[in-house]
Image (cartoon, grey):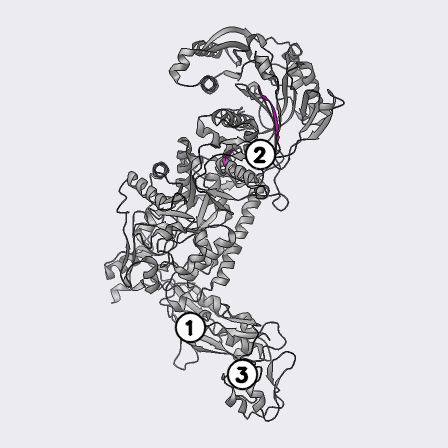
Amino acid sequence: MLKEGQVRIPSGCAIAAIIDRKGGMINGSEIIKSIALMHDRSNGLGGGFAAYGIYPEHRDEYAFHIFYENAQAHQNCEEFLFKHFNIDVAERIPTKKVDSISNGPDIWRYFGRVNRVRMKNSRLDESEYVVQCVTKVNAAYDGAYIFSSGKNIGCFKAVGYPEDVGEFYMLDRYNAYLWTAHGRFPTNTPGWWGGAHPFNILDWSIVHNGEISSYDTNRRYIEQFGYKCTMQTDTEVITYLFDHLIRHHNLPVNVAADVLTAPEWAEIDRMDSDKKEYFTNLRAIYSGALVNGPFSVILGSNKGLLAINDRLKLRSLTAATKGSRAYFASEESAIRIICPDPEKLWSVSGAEPVFVPLELNEEEDV
Amino acid sequence: MSVNYIPRRFTVVRDKELCINCGCCVRQCSNECHCFADDRKTVISHSADCVACHRCVDLCPTGALRIEKYVCDYRENANWTPQYQQEICRQAQTGGVLLSGMGTPKDYPVYWDKILLNASQVTNPSIDPLREPMEIRTILGRKPEKLTVEKKGKSTVEMPPQVILETPIMFSAMSFGSISLNAQKSLAMAAKELGTLFNIGEGGLHPDLQPFTDRSIVQVASGRFGVHSDYLNNSKIVEIKIGQGAKPGIGGHLPGEKVSVEVSNARMIPEGSDAISPAPHHDIYSIEDLRQLIWAIKQATNNKKPVCVKIAAVHNVAAIVSGCARAGADIVAIDGFRGGTGAAPTRIRDNVGIPIELALASADQRLRDEGTRSQISLVAAGSFRCSADIVKAIALGADACYCASAPLIAMGCHMCATCNTGKCNWGIATQRPELTKRLNPDIMYKRVVNLITAWNHEIKEIMGGMGINSVDSLRGNRLMLRGIGLSEKELEILGIKHAGE
Amino acid sequence: MKRIYAIEELCLNCRLCEVHCKTAHSLSKDVFKANKYEEPTPESRVTVYGNNFASAALNCRHCDDPKCVKACITGAMTKDKTTGIVYVNENKCIGCMTCLAVCPYGCIKQGKAAVKCDLCRNENEPACVKNCPNHALIYVDKGGEEK
């Protein structure tokens, strides 16, 4: 069977996320508990987590998590990596044997900084340089797949149910201020480790539930700007859209969210002139970036957490807050199991993004 | 001369049982196929000049008339078909270039018929357009590279002129001269009601169309007929016509006898003089010249009007479209070789150019490869027969489609393909007052509105089935298309997969 | 009252109004029978004058103060007080055709009894208007007096 990247794979899913706005640490066991409750929303063909703030000792270094399918891939990729980055640490990611997870690749992580000479010669800014290196490995190095590439963040994913994946990576040993989680229900894939979610590039990570019907419009839009949708998944294209809008076009996160879930014309026509102009321009310029079809998406970043739902509200997504924490999940029960008495609980409405900014970012950086 | 015998093409069959000798057919046929017999009471038909336009059939109150193909068998020959023999005969007699009207009737592949559409099942819900909003609003014009904002809700970007259409269907260029004023008026009224645009063609603007100029696309063609400052400034879009799908590389010639007072006023040429559109624009011999003309028009319109460049789909279309975009065109219209015409040399119409499907697919991909697709608008033209054709064109990458033949059929055209004779019995492709008055704009505009409204409904229905609620998400969405019975190469050019893949 | 108006610029000279008027005023109400077999042949109340270049369908104006009614010696020609329709009572008419002589529009035809438009009396829309393919005949109330 063809795997992700060789064929387009739509899939349904469960998603969950927790953020502490003040930067307080949350243990991985909590998010596992939440996603595990929605066991029936995934089918064992993929689960994963993204965690922000887990590598404080390496906070200024890029953390690359890589799957190797064979020794040759390992060797080639490391050669590339050592040439383009100054790698400080190279190690296997610690895992624990779990019955339900088998046939996995060799999983490594690296901490390092960019090779400034090569970067200057390439005339790219740092983030663009990193993105292009990651894209290069994923597209051209058969058997090697970089699935996490941000600073002080890490993605952990595998083929299996999400709770098993959490156990496999021993996530209860990690503490993060922001967790996202994903349980996958792909409809036609044999299950490939790289195809599990979250999808990550730099500090952006995405978990997504749904199947977008605008996939090819979005893909062909974003590929104009040098992206290559090698995975052919919805999550990948949504990540690239956010990356492009925020990093290349310098749009604030909530404006980027407006681009993806722009309101309907009938609604825009009724708005006051400023808003009308704003949305008309936005829809005219970014018609190819409008995302259509059922989806709920949680975008994690070092700036905070963004949750969006499709325009028709065809996918479930519930949000809750308590104290400095905000919770999101496909089902309300998955929130209540870790936060039985939320102060506020609501269903995220279509075309109304929820953005939870991280408030202590600067302080933390000091 | 007997050597020149060309069998007639049709026979008018009159059912004497049904005929009430009212003479309606006699008075309606501009080809004079019917007449009263010597008793001045009995109606008879001779069929020599019948073009199968069905005017008499349609109006006969008792349904007594029928048109049949006249079969005069030739010795069978797959190579020397009767058509070629007859054309040779005609040319041997006249020594002239053969002329035809409408798009090519030849049996070239119609790729629309070899492309199938997708629909949602299970993993993704289809959407009911009667219950949920379904958007087909389309915006044409050059887009800035990116949005700039002061904050969420406040845009600070300077937008070039944009044109909002309430449907992705526009009416393609048909000049006053090639079609009647009443036909133009019907299209103008329909465009206004539908919130779309009609293209007045290269024949200048008749004063009667003045109230509709805010829904008009005006052409600047190689003859520059009727072009002046008000003409440009009153329009919605200015279109530079480089070529036409039915006759790429060929100019136009409206004979002096057709240049009536009204045509002469609209075209700003002396009455009775030949109106000649040269094959090229004589101030555009290369892409940099095009750039100058585009900027000249932008200056003349104070940068208020998007400029469209319309080209015929020829072999190198992708590079030409890209060149036009780089030369400053805000919109590029590509006209496929099946597109219609009022008159074109038959050989050109039937042999020059390429199908719009392939031209559109390769042009759209080229613009994407160059990263400029999102900034300019692409309009496809050249025979859209139904709403599914439009959906397929948009999914291949078009922003909007130009339709002409379909609204003409709505107005009565029966595709008799003799537009060039100026004897159109339906009052469309003629300037003869006794014929043009047969087309009552008050009736016909409603039929055109009905047609496009019906297509809009169908487009929404198809989009809903795909789980898409905005035409924006259909545009360029080639995964929604699958080829059927196409070769690897054709699929590659169209950028689609084969059915079952 | 509602009257029929002919729009000359739209008249095609197809004369289908005549065919359908005949049919509407026939016994059979059938287009074949009425126009082909019925005896006596029904007369059309509307007449198209002109040629393909300029033509118009002419029929009774149903004047507010009809001369034909005044001139009628038997009282067969009457103007209906409620509807305003001017019509002939065929039982009373003796066919003297005085009405034809005084009609300023020439809209009355000769027959055993006088033949004229009755606006298809019981119909909402007269047959000629209903069947005009180019809407060159309209049936509207424009108000005012026809003189």
Is B88 or B387 nearer to us in this picture? B387
Question: In the visual, does B374 lie left or right of B4?
Answer: right
Regarding residue B302, the answer to whether it shows in the image is: yes
For the residues carrying marks 2 and 1, which lies nearer the camera in this image? 2
Is B9 or B437 nearer to us in this picture? B437
* Range drawn in magenta: A287-311
Q: What amino acid type is highlighted by mark number 3?
A: Thr
Q: Is residue C118 magenta?
A: no
Q: Which residue in the structure is indicated by mark 3?
A: C41
Question: Can marks 1 and 3 be said to lie on one chain?
Answer: no
Question: In the visual, does B13 lie left or right of A148?
Answer: left
Pointer 2 and pointer 1: residues touching (CB < 8 Å)?
Answer: no
Residue at (41, 40) in percent of width and height: B360
Q: Secondary structure at mark 1?
A: helix
Q: Which residue in the structure is indicated by mark 1?
A: B27
Report the Cα–Cα distance between label 1 and label 3.
Answer: 23 Å
Which residue occupies the extreme right position in the image?
A: A341
